[in-house]
Image (tube, rainbow, N blue to C red):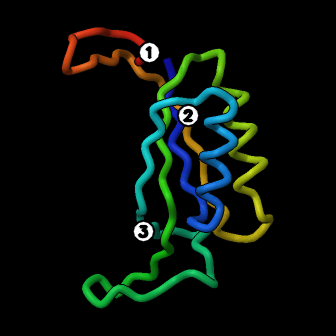
Amino acid sequence: MKEIKAYIRPALAHRVIEVLKQAGATNISMMRVKGLGLLEDPQNKEYDAESVERSSEMVKLEIVLKDSDVDRYVQLIKEFAHTGNVGDGLVYVTDVERTIKLRTGEEGIL
């Protein structure tokens, strides 16, 4: 199993989620996050009064899936989250050793 973590522009989150669902993705987690880094969006940055750091608002998507689905889902994210501008985001793919459904104790891709 693998996990995809994708950091994308908030304005593009809806269409990325829709194409992932159409491709068969289930159990997508989504959260708003703020990022700091070299590739922050210069048009969508603000100063945080507490940390005095520049940050950009992003949406983080998390999907756990079968190894065989990774390339297809990454390609969809790249296609539908791309604007060609600084701050488009990042995609990480990592191994998942185990998943457990708390209600039933069932293990595997859920």
Q: Is residue 37 left or right of residue 72?
A: left
Which residue occupies the foreground of this view, 109 or 19? 19
Local SS, label 2: strand
Residue bearing the label numbered 1: 109
Whole-Å distance between the Cαs marked 2 and 1?
16 Å
Residue 86 against residue 101 in the figure, above or below = below
Local SS, label 3: strand
Local SS, label 1: loop
Residue 91 against residue 2 in the figure, above or below = below
State the quadrant of the C terminus: top left
Q: Position of residue 37 (x, y in %)?
A: 51, 68
Whichever of labels 3 and 1 marks the residue nearer the N terminus, that label is: 3
Q: At 56% across and 17% down in the image, what residue appears?
A: 66
Q: Indicate the amino acid at tag 1.
A: Ile
Residue bearing the label numbered 2: 93
Which residue occupies the foreground of this view, 14 or 90? 14
Residue bearing the label numbered 3: 34
Q: Nearer the viewer, mark 2 or mark 1?
A: 1
Q: Indicate the amino acid at tag 3.
A: Lys
Q: Position of residue 67 (x, y in %)?
A: 59, 17
Whole-Å distance between the Cαs marked 2 and 3?
20 Å
10 Å crowding of disc 3: few (<14), some (14-19), many (20+): some
Q: Are marks 2 and 1 in contact (CB under 8 Å)?
A: no
Whichever of labels 2 and 1 marks the residue nearer the N terminus, that label is: 2
Q: Is residue 90 left or right of residue 26?
A: right
